[in-house]
Image: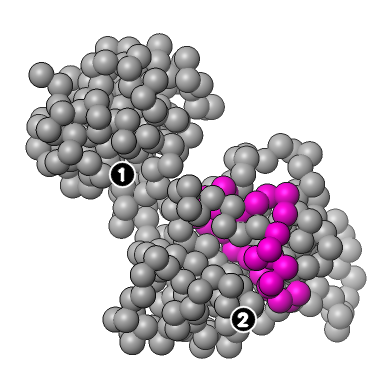
């Protein structure tokens, strides 16, 4: 078997692949563009991709030998699953293994924004710390605040469990009500409008789909408290970027913490990066050594199983794609 890996990943995944296949690893630090991807993966039986590679029908038609695509991510908005299924290509993802690490980072980002950690640390580096100041770098309290979780999946639930330790009131909205979680977490189900109105912190944990794209726009931002904080560790496209920049500049909301952006990365001269009330990090919510190793290993396990004709541990379309599999 020949497997094309679109970027260097942790050795835990590469070593597993190498036990059963010839492994080609994209050698550059930046991801391949569409033409480069097609040329690089020509003749491969499987692709191990990251969220930076768009794999659609056109790409798959140009790579007719590919029988499986394993995305090293929990999200899969970069993969056209329907196009893959119609071509008999199995698509896999890596959920669960990054849940707790991502929830940890969500809270790290929330606390850093709420307590103005970066502006304060930057002031120290600039030599501006002269004395203790009673009005210096005043932030927002997290303990006892109201947290609104948009998307109560695995990561949203993990964030809610951490919020209980901060005695936060938990509101949530989702495509369905989760009564067992309401009992466990003391969470209250509300619609999106009520959630953004009542929350001190709004944290986004939904996949990027046609329904969720720019679900936080100018209208939702206007409904939020002027003291509110918006946190996004999901996908950048869930927020209308320009509307958010407007809201932060005008004081419509107090601050934002973004681990994901639209576009991603933001251009260095983008106005969001110049605002003092926004903290942007480079999509690192799952970036612990242990978690990235688990993600790489699961991505490899998924791909190898699919290529052997076995059910992968985490596949999106195993049954449907198998019925259209390559002869």
Q: Which residues are magenta?
A: 218-243
Q: Which mark is residue 220?
A: none
Q: Quadrant of residue 55?
A: top left
Drawn side of residue 264 relative to residue 314, left or right? right
* Observer able to see residue 248: yes
- Whether 228 is among the magenta residues is yes
267 part of magenta stretch? no
Q: Residue 213: horizontal and vertical position, in percent?
A: 54, 50
Residue drawn where x is 31% and y is 27% of the image:
47
Of residue 233 and residue 137, the one placed in the foreground of this image is 233
Q: Nearer the viewer, mark 2 or mark 1?
A: 2
Secondary structure, mark 2, is: helix
Q: Residue at x 58, y 88 (%)?
A: 144
Q: Nearer the viewer, residue 160 or 108?
A: 160
In the rendered view of the protein, which quadrant contains the C terminus? top left
Q: Which residue is mark 1?
A: 93
Residue 267: name its quadrant: top right
Say few, some or many: other residues with alpha carbon within 10 Å of mark 1 (under 14 / 14 to 19 / 20 or more): many
Secondary structure beneath dot 1 equals loop
- Across and down, in percent, residue 297 comes to 27, 42
| Quadrant housing the N terminus | top left
Q: Which mark is residue 198?
A: 2
Q: Residue at (62%, 40%) from the top-left corner?
A: 263
N-terminal-most mark, 2 or 1: 1
The residue drawn where x is 44% and y is 79% is: 189
């Amino acid at each position: 078997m020949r497997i094309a890996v679109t970027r260097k990943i942790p050795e835990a995944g590469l070593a597993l692949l190498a036990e059963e296949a010839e492994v080609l690893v994209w050698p550059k630090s930046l991801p391949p563009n569409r033409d480069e991807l097609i040329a690089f993966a020509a003749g491969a039986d499987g692709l191990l991709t990251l969220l930076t590679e768009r794999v659609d029908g056109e790409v798959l038609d140009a790579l007719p030998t590919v029988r499986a695509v394993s995305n090293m991510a929990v999200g899969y908005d970069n993969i056209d699953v329907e196009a893959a299924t119609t071509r008999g290509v199995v698509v896999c993802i890596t959920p669960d293994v990054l849940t707790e690490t991502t929830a940890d980072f969500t809270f790290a980002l929330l606390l850093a924004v709420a307590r103005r950690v970066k502006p304060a640390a930057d002031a120290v580096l600039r030599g501006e710390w002269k004395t203790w100041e009673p009005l210096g770098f005043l932030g927002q309290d997290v303990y006892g605040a109201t947290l609104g979780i948009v998307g109560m999946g695995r990561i949203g639930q993990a964030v809610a469990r951490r919020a209980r330790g901060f005695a936060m009131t938990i509101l949530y909205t989702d495509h369905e009500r989760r009564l067992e979680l309401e009992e466990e977490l003391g969470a209250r189900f509300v619609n999106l409008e009520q959630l953004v109105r009542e929350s001190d912190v709004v944290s986004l944990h939904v996949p990027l789909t046609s329904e969720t794209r720019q679900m936080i726009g100018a209208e939702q931002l206007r409904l939020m408290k002027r003291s509110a904080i918006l946190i996004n560790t999901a996908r950048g496209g869930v927020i209308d970027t320009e509307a958010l920049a407007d809201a932060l500049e005008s004081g419509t909301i107090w601050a934002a913490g973004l681990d994901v952006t639209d576009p991603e990365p933001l251009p260095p001269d983008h106005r969001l990066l110049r605002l003092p009330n926004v903290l942007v990090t480079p999509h690192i919510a799952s970036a612990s050594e242990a978690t990235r190793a688990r993600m790489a290993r699961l991505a490899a396990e998924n791909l190898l199983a699919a290529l052997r004709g076995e059910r992968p541990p985490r596949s999106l379309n195993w049954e449907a794609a198998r019925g259209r599999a390559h002869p």
